[in-house]
Amino acid sequence: MATHLHRPVSPKAPEAAQTSSGPTRADGATEVTVTKEVTETTAASAAAPRPAYAVRVEGLTRSFDGRPVIDDLRLDVRPGEFVALLGRSGCGKSTLLRILAGLDRDIEGTVLVPRRKAVAFQAPRLMPWKKVWRNVLLGLPGKPARAVADQALEEVGLGHRSDAWPKTLSGGEAQRASLARALVREPDLLLLDEPFGALDALTRIKAQRLVGELWQRRGCAVLLVTHDVEEAVLLADRVLVMDEGVIAHEQEIDLDRPRDIADPRFAEIRGQLLERLGVATAAEAA
């Protein structure tokens, strides 16, 4: 995986915000102390060594109408690591992902992410007036050749639908097109916001396998937001449980790949995570 400098997610800082920059780190990122919001910093030399992390979050707070949805959160993701983020609806999972993607900048704290990152959402968000291959190239700088899109589509098993219109795609095909659009950016960080939520059970299994294969082939860091505990254990190196705006639990998934859901150890880890989410406790109480 190519090395790229990190940069902070940088909101448009109001005049009242106070920030101070410290020394440049050995990993190429500049230390930033933030009172209200993170501000843009100047990148160090492109020859900087590979960072020890793909994501670093320190003291992150995001509030809506005065209520913190994310509260003094800290998070590190290592290069090439697959991390799954679980939590009940409204706990701040998707808000955190949007902040990492640079889509939400009204924050307090420090957020460092790679320059090259990509996002795939639950809804594929394909432009209906553009053919599939043009959707894949959407947003890329310059005038990339069609071959770039075709290669990405082949990688996700959709090369034969390159000239199709989005409305003719099945749900699984549309999601694969969305993945191709993310991968064509050659990200160092891939952010997945419940990308399989709208798929039927069989298509979901195929999509999970595809994402696992692409991650192992590409070697980028992945942060997957999901409600599916089994999916998290199946794919991730590490599972985080988010509750009331903080990381409340962290669990390494020490299982060989490919993983077998029939493995007793798999079931044990799944049960532990369900208990952390309050599901097992509620079932026992019933």
Image (spheres, rainbow, N blue to C red):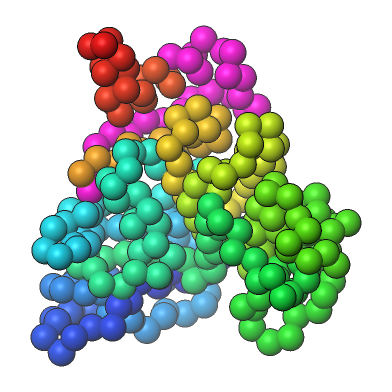
**Splitting the image into 4 quarters, where does residue 16 fall?**
bottom left
Asked if residue 115 lies in the magenta stretch, the reply is: no
Residue 70 located left or right of residue 228: left
Asked if residue 261 lies in the magenta stretch, the reply is: yes
Q: x, y (%) of residue 262?
A: 59, 13
In this view, 3 is above or below 18 = above
Q: Which residue sits at x=58%, y=19%? A: 261
**Residue at the extreme right:** 160
Q: Which residue sits at x=52%, y=74%? A: 47
Residue 149 located left or right of residue 277: right
Residue 162 located left or right of residue 172: right
Q: x, y (%) of residue 129?
A: 72, 75
Q: Nearer the viewer, residue 97 or 280?
A: 280
Q: x, y (%) of residue 59?
A: 20, 58
Q: Which residue sits at x=52%, y=77%? A: 46
Which region shows up in magenta? Answer: 245-268
Q: x, y (%) of residue 36?
A: 15, 73
Q: Which residue sits at x=61%, y=24%? A: 259
